[in-house]
Amino acid sequence: MRIEASVLEAPSGRPRDDDGGDTRFRSLMRAEDWESLPLPIRRRFSKRLANGATALYAGEVAAGRPGRFAQVVQSAKRFAGPTGLEEYVGYGVGMTLTVEAREGALIFRSQDYFIELFGSRWRLPGWLAPGDTIVTHAELPDGRFSFTLQLIHPLLGHMIRQMAMFREVVT
């Protein structure tokens, strides 16, 4: 199955490093953890986009749903909240994230889930949350990268495990 994911451009005024890159992901990690990541991952997560620009990545789900239509996955990371990073999935639903490097991969973990409605925000209690979300971004040969999403419920175990391989679409 072919899927496309877009990473939406963040607001202007973000911090930049010496080569003009965005330092917000790097600032959420210890310097030695950031430096332990492969250069292509560091470049991908410090990419600076012009206002309104979008980075596109096309790929395939490794153990997906054969014969199904292509899908577009859109979510937006926001540099906000108690951990400094949130994933907004739409319809008022999001999660706060922590970020770390492990074995050359970038790992995002849910810390808690929230709902935003009518200008208010509510944190979901643990018993209402779907479980722990873990996203692993790892480099592959030939300029590709893998994106592995796991949702692990404390009682029901692995609810979702999906892996996709992507390559940047150069426009």
Image (cartoon, grey):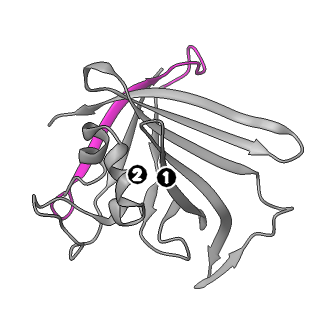
Q: Residue at x 74, y 42 (%)?
A: 152
The x and y percentages for residue 111 are 65, 62
The x and y percentages for residue 168 are 26, 34
For the residue marked with disc 2, what is the amino acid? Asp
Judge whether residue 55 can be spotted in this image.
Answer: yes
Which quadrant holds the C terminus? top left
Q: Nearer the viewer, residue 53 or 150?
A: 150
Report crowding for label 1: few under 14, some 14 to 19, many 20 or more residues within 10 A (C-alpha).
some
Does 79 sit left or right of 122 as displayed?
A: left
Q: Nearer the viewer, residue 67 or 114?
A: 114
Contact flag, marks 2 and 1 (Cβ < 8 Å):
yes
- Image position of 158 with respect to 79: above or below: above
Q: Residue at x 36, y 53 (%)?
A: 32
Magenta-drawn segment: 49-69
Q: Is residue 35 magenta?
A: no
- Image position of 127 with respect to 82: above or below: above
Q: Which residue is mark 1?
A: 100
Q: Which residue is mark 2?
A: 33
